[in-house]
Amino acid sequence: MSKDVMRAVSGAVLLLALTSCGGGGDVAGDSAEFAVSPKENTLKLGAGASCSDASQVPPVVVTIIGGQPPYRIVNSSPEALVVDKTEATGKDPQFRVSYYKNAVVCVNPGTITVLDYHSQVASFEYSVEVEEATTE
C-alpha cells in the first residue's frame, strides 16, 4: 500500500474511533468554571420584624455560570425558601429564590445546591438577619 492510502485509512480509523466513543465533540464537554452569581444574599430586617416579613421582599435572581447543562437545583430549606424551578437549561440559566410567605423559622443560612450534568456542585446561601430591639 502507498503512504497516501495508509494515511487515508489511518485517518478514517481515527475518526471512527473518536465518533464511536463520543470524543471529538463538545456536547458533554467540561467547563473549568462552575459557579452561581450571586453566591449569597443576606436580607436585613428591622427590629420587630419576623422571618415571614422576608416574603415581602422581591426574589433574588441567581445565574448559573459555566458547567454543563442540564442543571439540577436542590433546596435544602423548603420550609423557609421558595425556589421557582428544580431544573435549569438554556443559554442564560437562572432561578429565583424568595422567602416562604408563612415561614415560621429563619434559616441562617438556607442553601440552594446546583449540580451540573457532571455532578459538579455550586451553591447559593440565603440568610435573614433580624435586628434586635433596643431597650432603654
Image: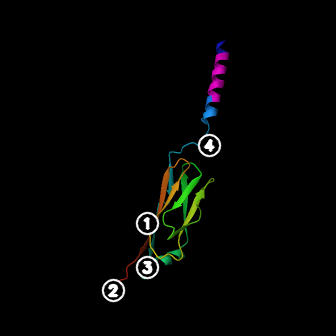
Q: Which of marks 4 and 1 is nearer the N terminus?
A: 4
Q: Residue at 55% of width from left, 72% of height from top?
A: 58
- The amino acid sitting under disc 2 is Thr
Q: Give the range drawn in magenta.
A: 5-16
- The amino acid sitting under disc 4 is Val
Q: For mark 1, give the secondary structure.
A: loop
Where residue 79 appears, x then y in whole percent? Answer: 50, 70
Q: Is residue 69 magenta?
A: no
Q: Is residue 85 above or below residue 120?
A: below
Q: Residue at 43% of width from left, 79% of height from top?
A: 46
Secondary structure that dominates the magenta span: helix
Q: What mark, if any, has residue 78 been given in the picture?
A: none
The residue under label 2 is 135
- The amino acid sitting under disc 3 is Gly
Q: In which quarter of the image is residue 88?
A: bottom right
Whether residues under marks 1 and 3 lie with C-beta atoms below 8 angstroms apart, the answer is no
